[in-house]
Image (cartoon, rainbow, N blue to C red):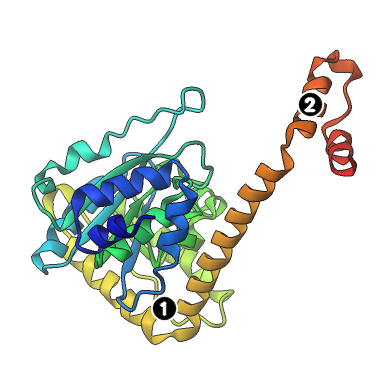
Amino acid sequence: MFDKLLSEIKKNNYKSISKAISLVENNNTDLINEISSCFPISKKVHRIGITGPPGAGKSSITNLLIKKYRKDNLKVAVLLVDPSSPFTKGAVLGDRIRMLDYYNDDNVFIRSFGSRGSSGGLSENINEIADIFSLACYDIIIFETVGVGQIEIDVVEQVDSVILVLVPESGDDIQMLKAGIIEIADIFVINKSDRSDADKLLVSLKKILSLVNLDNNDLVWNYPIIKTVAIKDFGVDDLMKELNNHFIFLNNQNNIINNKINNRYSNQINKILNKKLIHLFWNDKNKEILNNELKKNIKDRLSPYRLVQKLLND
């Protein structure tokens, strides 16, 4: 059904890739199935996640990474997730405006997505969209997540290497430990490191990582902390070096890379099952039961738990 479209994607046809992304975003299950049937692909694609608080400079760092990867003649896809309004479901989609330099480069594909309420910061079908770029033989796929801090942990399920971008004002030790996001990063970046308190944050990070490392008996990756000033292109070469080191490390540690692949596969299965089961569950009969309950006075309604039990039993 989509043979021609898939063939054009493999040729890196920009319009075909754009069309496929739009179809996947709109949950075209036929295309998603056909893309899935094309895997596994022998080419190794480095999936990089960039996360961190708003204003940390994630997009500036992404912009420089694109520039440097292109100098190495690598094909780069960038998936930028902007926050969606919980009311209108619309998104600002402003990150692409900062990356206009690459619009005439056929080997750079930049796309913004609304998070559409996804609590983990990534758009709902982002993994399937990344598979399109794997099919088109891209070398690097960069995921930049919504900058809302503590709930940005879904990114770890989709990528090989996670960069956490912080700034000197990112907060004290306790707040950072509470965030939990510290535990998902592979590489830490202190951006805007020419500001005061950058060294204080560096000391705090080292102290936190030493505590985390004590609990990890199998630790073999030495989590680097890179100081950058993105607007001056300072430190980003060091970041690229550590990204390359981490990718080599992963591919030399079969148990780690296999765990990542297996987790990604399992999460996709669970997501597909959840969608299909929810769709099957909300048949006309169950919708009617729910609507009848909603028509009652609030004090006369069944509790949500009891209503679910009733729906399951009926």
Total count of labels: 2
Q: Residues within 10 Å of mark 1 (few under 14, many from 20)?
A: few
Q: Which of the image's four quarters has the C terminus?
A: top right
Amino acid type indicated by mark 1: Trp
Q: Is any atom of residue 170 visible in this view?
A: no
Residue occupying the point 47% across, 36% down: 116
Sequence-wise first label, 1 or 2:
1
Which x, y percent locates residue 261? 48, 72
Quarter of the image containing the N terminus?
bottom left
Residue found 44% across the figure and 67% down from its top = 37
Where residue 26 sits in the image (x, y, percent)? Answer: 44, 41
Residue at 40 percent of width and 61 percent of height:
35
Question: In this orientation, which residue lies closer to the viewer: 307 or 147?
Answer: 307
Judge from the rendering whether residue 196 lies leftward or rightward of residue 257; answer left or right: left
Tag 2, which secondary structure? helix
For label 1, the residue is: 221
Vertical order, 283 against 30 (above or below): above
* Alpha carbons under labels 1 and 2: distance apart: 55 Å
Amino acid residing under circle 2? Glu
Residue 119 visible, this angle: yes
- Indicate which disc residue 288 carries: 2
In the drawing, does residue 235 fall left or right of residue 197?
Answer: left
Q: Residue at x 36, y 57 (%)?
A: 130
Q: Nearer the viewer, mark 1 or mark 2?
A: 2
